[in-house]
């Protein structure tokens, strides 16, 4: 644990052990250089508190780069609520209220929104004690609603830029795209892809979602066992992070990877592995900024919905094209190029 924190290049970590539930809360503040640290609240079970904190640290850094590429005036942070194996769902509301209180005590150091395991309705509860630092509440509670559709729209824009790069044409017509995970982001993404004429495949572990998207909506289902080895033009991870590793990259039969999940690379060497295999990688944080940007823009900067859509599309078009160009010019991975763009913008911040 000590080494983990020493090796991290962020600013602050807030730790709370929630005694009534046995949950651990870690709020990682990676950078406040461009603005107040902002990032989702991830709520799930982890094998250990160490794994949970390490996830928070990595995800918070991702938020810093995510906002830095389009020079959006927010810093990077992330919260992880690691619930115990025997968590009683009945205690969830009280846990969220205590968590909200903690955010309020931080007095604006950290702003949050939904992430894996939390929803806009959870944000409504957290905001009861945590306002005004809680984004993405439901519209009936006065918020801008779920961030998933805006994230998906941004990822879709990123996929168009990938097609432009691969085929000289941004059109998705007839392209085969495999989406891993049809949760908050994946479900809107596959609709965009279908509307654009793509051949859409999806993979999902939740049986209920599989039934809905395969049986009711007619999308092609790919079981988890073959998700990495299924032939497609674009593989789009939209579930959890760490899916691109030595093992999975060697199985891939795609031309490009472009998805909405955070921290897709298992380790730093995996960007090079993708490049060596000739697979074009759209760095996760460059194309998944849409939700955080649109929601924060609407709620904190007074953007209209139309303005938010324009900003997201414009930022991702510009950001990803710049990253691809720089990677080619310098002979580096797209991940390294994205990092360079982000660092450059961060060094201009005060
Ligand atoms: N889950 C979002 C992300 O990873 C976090 C977020 C959503 C932040 C909405 C602010 C507002 O980008």
Image (tube, rainbow, N blue to C red):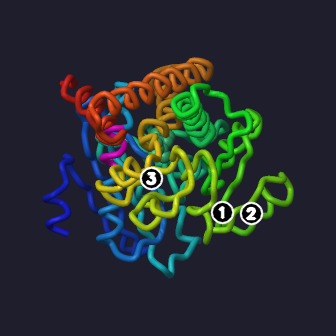
Q: Are marks 2 and 1 in contact (CB under 8 Å)?
A: yes
| Disc 3 target residue | 41
Gap in Å between the C-alphas at discs 2 and 1?
Answer: 6 Å
The tally of labels here is 3
Position in image of residue 156 (x %, y %): 60, 35
Report which residue position mark 2 lands on: 210
Q: CA distance from mark 3 to mark 1?
A: 22 Å
Magenta span covers which residues? 60-65
* Between 165 and 147, the one nearer to me in the picture: 165
Q: Counting other residues with Cα less than 10 Å from the Cα at mark 1, is it few (<14), some (14-19), or many (20 or more)?
A: many
Say which mark, if any, is on residue 204. 1
Q: Quadrant of the C terminus?
A: top left
Q: Is residue 62 magenta?
A: yes
Q: Are marks 3 and 2 in contact (CB under 8 Å)?
A: no
Secondary structure under tag 3 reads: strand
Residue 264, image x and y in percent? 43, 53
The residue positioned 57% from the left and 49% from the top of the image is 236
- Which residue is depicted at the point 30% across and 62% down? 54
Depth check, mark 3 against mark 1: the one in front is: 1
Q: Earlier in the sequence, mark 3 or mark 1?
A: 3
């Amino acid at each position: 644990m000590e080494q983990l924190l020493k090796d991290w290049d962020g600013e602050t970590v807030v730790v709370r052990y929630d005694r009534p539930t046995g949950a651990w809360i870690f709020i990682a503040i990676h950078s406040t250089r461009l603005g107040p640290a902002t990032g989702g609240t991830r709520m799930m079970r982890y094998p250990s508190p160490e794994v949970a904190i390490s996830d928070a640290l990595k995800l918070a850094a991702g938020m810093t780069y995510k906002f830095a590429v389009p020079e959006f005036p927010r810093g990077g942070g992330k919260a992880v609520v690691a619930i115990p194996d025997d968590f009683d769902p009945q205690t969830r509301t009280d846990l969220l209220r205590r968590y909200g209180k903690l955010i309020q005590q931080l007095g604006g150091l950290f702003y949050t929104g939904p992430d894996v395991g939390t929803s806009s309705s959870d944000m409504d509860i957290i905001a009861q004690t945590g306002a005004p630092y809680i984004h993405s509440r439901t519209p009936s509670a006065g918020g801008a609603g779920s961030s998933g559709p805006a994230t998906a729209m941004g990822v879709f824009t990123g996929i168009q830029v990938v097609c432009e790069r691969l085929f000289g044409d941004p059109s998705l017509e007839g392209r085969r795209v495999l989406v891993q995970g049809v949760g908050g982001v994946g479900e809107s993404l596959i609709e965009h892809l279908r509307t654009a004429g793509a051949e859409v495949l999806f993979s999902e572990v939740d049986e209920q979602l599989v039934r809905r998207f395969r049986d009711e909506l007619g999308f092609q289902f790919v079981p988890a066992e073959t998700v990495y080895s299924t032939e497609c033009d674009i593989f789009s991870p939209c579930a959890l992070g760490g899916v691109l590793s030595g093992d999975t990259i060697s199985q891939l039969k795609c031309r490009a990877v472009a998805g909405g999940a955070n921290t897709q690379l298992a380790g730093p060497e995996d960007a090079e592995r993708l490049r060596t295999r000739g697979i074009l990688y759209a760095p996760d944080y460059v194309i998944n900024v849409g939700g955080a940007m649109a929601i924060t823009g609407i709620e904190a900067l007074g953007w209209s919905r139309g303005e938010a859509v324009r900003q997201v599309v414009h930022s991702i078009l510009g950001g990803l094209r710049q990253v691809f160009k720089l990677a080619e010019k310098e002979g580096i991975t797209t991940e390294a190029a994205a990092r360079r763009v982000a660092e450059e913008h961060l060094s201009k911040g005060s």
